[in-house]
Image: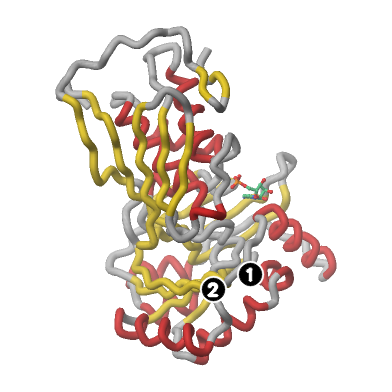
Amino acid sequence: MTTGTQAQTVTVRVPGKINLGLSVGPLRDDGYHELSTVYHAVSLYDTVTVQPADSWSVHVTGPWGEHVPADDSNLALVAARTLAKRRARKAKVDPVRIDIDKHIPVAGGMAGGSADAAATLVGCRELWGLDHLENDLLELMGASLGSDIPFLLHGGTAMGSGRGEQVTSVLARGELHWVLWAGEGLSLSTPQVYAECDRLREEAGVTPGPPEPSGELMTALRRMDTDEVAAALHNDLQEAAISLEPVLAEALSAGLDLGARAGIVSGSGPTVAFLVGSQTEAIDLSVGLAANGPTGDIERAVGPVPGAQIIHQRSSPEPPRARPDTDRSGPLGPVIG
Ligand code: C5P
């Protein structure tokens, strides 16, 4: 902020993502797979509020709140502390309390943890007055914490390459309507799904080449023709996710039987995204799935939507108080220095 006021709380809204295309290449020496993906941010949001506090903490509420660790391992907290450490030499920063209202399925293939980390970076940048920290730098910092974080900062529809952290916008006008199904009690670990993909390929004697973006998908997105996009959706991890959670095949065929234009496992799963032609079709499909599909949470969403964005902040007109340098530690241990 450049107004002379000091932000006291900052609230950031951040979307979940699905992958419209996910082409997985060979396993690299660093343990990641080379990817070519098309990310698509959808209107299923977490809300993250950051405010100064005496010690570092994270608190999670909302429909998926109980599934999120509220400890040192929480990626939002890791992101805040990483930003603090990197700024420690240039600017003095407070510990923060992070509140997450969790609506994006946890361990669901929609990058919910990365979304909260992206929102926290945006919130703390504002709270700590780090205006000079450009989006590119924030994306770079995000990339070191998780492959999907740069996209959750960027939003919209975008190509991801490398391990997914190199993001470039895709020209896509108009809107797509989605129904998202997250199976009750289901969760998949991302590394496990990639490992299963490698195992299935080895079993089938398939050696992956370099991952390629799909020209068909790019053309369909440029025209934003729902049926063309439906025909071009592709996910190399889908077979692996189904192999680990066979109920996903059941969910996919239930959605297609009920009129979805297409269905696809989102990223490493297990959330399934169904593409429909309109809001009315979305309502019909969600009602049908709730009645006749496998048990799960069902949400309607549209995409593309922007990435992490500040939606509310409360400022104090007072100049920032001088704070003692000494006690920078809290229940989660010392952070700076
Ligand atoms: O980057 P992120 O922490 O989200 O990745 C989680 C795990 O998913 C990695 O440790 C790796 O096992 C797997 N992964 C991968 N190739 C990618 C992205 C993730 O194998 N491109």
Could you tell which of marks 2 and 1 lies nearer the N-terminus? Answer: 1
Q: Residue 264 carries which label?
A: 2
**48 over 199 or under it: above or below:** above
x, y percent for residue 181: 50, 73
Taking the spot 45% from the left edge, 45% from the top edge, the residue there is: 116
Tell me whether circle 2 and circle 1 mark residues in contact (CB < 8 Å): yes
- The quarter of the displayed image where residue 264 is located: bottom right
Give the alpha-carbon distance from disc 2 to disc 1, as whole Å: 7 Å
Q: In this view, does 293 lie to the left or right of 154?
A: right
Under mark 1, the amino acid is: Gln
**240 over 117 or under it: above or below:** below
* Secondary structure state at the residue bearing disc 1: helix
x, y percent for residue 152: 42, 48
Q: Mark 1 points at which residue?
A: 238
**257 over 36 or under it: above or below:** below
x, y percent for residue 278: 31, 81
x, y percent for residue 328: 48, 16
- The quarter of the displayed image where residue 209 is located: bottom right
Q: Can residue 233 be seen in this view?
A: no
Taking the spot 75% from the left edge, 62% from the top edge, the residue there is: 196
Q: How crowded is mark 2: few (under 14 residues within 10 Å), some or many (20 or more)?
A: many
Q: Can residue 327 be seen in this view?
A: yes
Rendered-image quadrant of the N terminus: top left
Taking the spot 42% from the left edge, 37% from the top edge, the residue there is: 98
Under mark 2, the amino acid is: Ile
* Secondary structure state at the residue bearing disc 2: strand
Q: Is residue 261 left or right of residue 184?
A: left
Q: Residue 180 carries which label?
A: none
- The quarter of the displayed image where residue 7 is located: top left
Residue in front for this viewpoint, 233 or 75: 75
